[in-house]
Image (cartoon, rainbow, N blue to C red):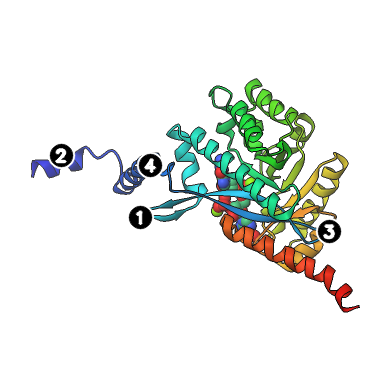
C-alpha cells in the first residue's frame, strides 16, 4: 500500500510521458548497436526534366531495427544528435553514398551524382575537421569530388558560425557541391541565397504537392525557379507525385525532379537494376532503326 501511495505521490511525469521517455531511452541505447549493421541507405532517383533520364540520386537513411522494423530518419536523427552519435552516422552515410556514386557511375559509364543530407548539428559540431577525412576517402576511392552533393537546410544557415562557414567553403573549394534543401519553408530564405554559394536549390514538396488546385504553390515554385536561374543555380523539385505536377514544373523550366511519380527510394541493388534496364532500353531504341533499315 505504501509503495502504491508513494508511487502515486511522486509521479512527476504522466504515464504517457514516462512511456515516451522509456521508449526514447531504449531507442537511443539500440542506436549504439545500430551503427554496425542495422543502418540502411536508400537511394531515390532524380530525373533530368529535359531528357527524362535518371541522372542523380538522393541518399536517404533508414534504420532497420530488429523489433521495431524500418524506422524513418525523422524518428531517429534527432536522437542520434542528442546521443552524440550523429558524427559516426554521418561518416557512414558519406562513405556508403560515395561508394554508390562510384558503382552507379560505372553502370552508366559517366559520372553520377549522389546527394547526402546533413543536419545543422552535423556541420556545426566541434569535432575535429571530419571534412578532411571525407576528402581523403574520396581520393582513395578514386571518386571525383563533384560526384557528391551535400544537402543543407536553412536551419543550418540560421545558426551559421564561422566554423560552419569555413567547413562549407573548404568542401566547396575541394569541388563538393551544395544544395539548399526544403527551400521556402524556413525564415528569410532570400538572404541565404546571397550569403551562401550553393549549386542547387531544392523546392520543398509543400509547394509542389498541395492538391490539384495548387495556384499559390505553383506561383511560388515558378518564381523560385526564375530566381534560382538568375542566380546561376539549378533547381530540383521535391515530392512530385502526379504527372500534371511534372508537366507544369517542366514547362516552368525546372531542371531536375524527384518524387514518387518516378520512383520511391530504393536499395542500391534495385537502383542499379533500374539504371541497367533503362540504359538497355535507350540502347535498344538507338540500335533498332539501324538494324531494321
Ligand atoms: P529530405 O532531405 O527533404 O528528403 C525528402 C523526403 O521526402 C524523404 O523522406 C523522401 O522519402 C520523401 N519523398 C520523396 N519523394 C516523395 C513524394 O513524392 N511524396 C512524398 N510525400 N514524400 C516524398 P525521408 O526519407 O523520410 O527523409 C526525411 C528527412 O530526413 C529528409 O528530408 C532529410 O532531411 C532527413 N534525412 C534523411 N537521410 C538523412 C541522413 O543521412 N542524415 C541526416 N542528417 N538527415 C537525413
Ligand atoms: Mg519521411
Ligand atoms: Mg534532402
Ligand atoms: Mg527536402
Q: Where is mark 2, residue-wise?
A: 6
Image quadrant containing the N terminus: top left
Q: Earlier in the sequence, mark 1 or mark 4?
A: 4
Q: Residue at x 69, y 66 (%)?
A: 277
Q: Where is mark 3, residue-wise?
A: 50
Compared to residue 218, the image places residue 181 above or below, namely above
Res 213 → quadrant:
bottom right
Residue 33 shows which numbered tag? 4
Comparing labels 2 and 4, the label whose residue is closer to the camera: 4
Local SS, label 3 = loop
Is residue 222 visible from the viewing direction of this image?
yes
Mark 2 and mark 4 in contact? Answer it, CB < 8 Å. Answer: no
| Closer-to-camera residue (81/188) | 81
Distance CA(mark 1)–CA(mark 4): 13 Å
Category of crowding for the residue at label 1, using alpha-carbon neighbours closer than 10 angstroms: few (below 14), some (14–19), many (at least 20)? few
- Residue 214 point in image, percent of width and height: 74, 61
Residue that extends furthest to the left in the rendered view of this protein: 1
Q: Residue at x 45, y 31 (%)?
A: 84
Mark 4 sits near ligand 1, with its Cβ under 8 Å away: no
Comparing labels 2 and 1, the label whose residue is closer to the camera: 1
Amino acid at each position: 500500500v505504501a509503495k502504491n501511495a508513494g508511487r502515486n505521490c511522486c509521479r512527476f511525469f504522466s504515464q504517457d510521458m514516462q512511456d515516451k521517455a522509456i521508449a526514447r531511452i531504449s531507442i537511443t541505447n539500440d542506436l549504439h548497436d545500430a551503427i554496425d549493421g542495422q543502418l540502411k541507405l536508400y537511394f531515390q532517383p532524380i530525373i533530368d526534366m529535359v531528357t527524362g533520364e535518371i541522372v542523380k540520386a538522393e541518399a536517404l537513411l533508414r534504420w532497420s531495427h530488429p523489433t521495431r522494423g524500418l524506422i524513418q530518419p525523422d524518428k531517429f536523427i534527432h536522437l542520434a544528435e542528442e546521443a552524440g552519435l550523429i558524427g559516426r552516422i554521418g561518416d557512414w552515410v558519406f562513405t556508403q553514398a560515395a561508394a554508390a556514386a562510384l558503382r552507379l557511375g560505372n553502370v552508366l559509364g559517366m559520372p553520377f551524382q549522389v546527394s547526402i543530407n546533413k543536419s545543422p548539428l552535423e556541420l556545426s559540431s566541434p569535432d575535429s575537421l571530419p571534412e578532411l577525412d571525407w576528402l581523403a576517402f574520396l581520393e582513395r576511392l578514386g571518386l571525383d569530388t563533384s560526384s557528391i552533393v551535400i544537402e543543407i537546410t536553412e536551419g543550418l544557415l540560421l545558426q551559421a558560425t564561422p566554423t560552419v562557414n569555413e567547413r562549407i567553403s573548404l568542401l566547396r573549394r575541394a569541388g563538393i557541391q551544395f544544395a539548399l534543401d526544403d527551400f521556402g519553408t524556413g525564415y528569410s530564405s532570400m538572404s541565404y541565397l546571397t550569403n551562401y554559394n550553393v549549386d542547387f536549390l531544392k523546392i520543398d514538396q509543400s509547394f509542389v504537392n498541395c492538391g490539384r488546385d495548387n495556384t499559390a504553390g505553383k506561383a511560388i515554385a515558378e518564381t523560385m525557379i526564375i530566381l534560382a536561374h538568375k542566380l546561376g543555380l539549378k533547381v530540383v523539385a521535391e515530392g512530385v507525385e502526379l504527372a500534371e505536377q511534372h508537366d507544369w514544373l517542366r514547362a516552368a523550366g525546372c531542371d531536375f525532379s524527384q518524387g514518387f511519380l518516378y520512383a520511391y527510394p530504393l536499395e542500391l541493388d534495385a537502383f542499379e537494376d533500374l539504371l541497367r534496364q533503362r540504359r538497355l532500353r535507350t540502347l535498344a531504341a538507338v540500335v533498332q532503326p539501324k538494324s531494321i533499315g
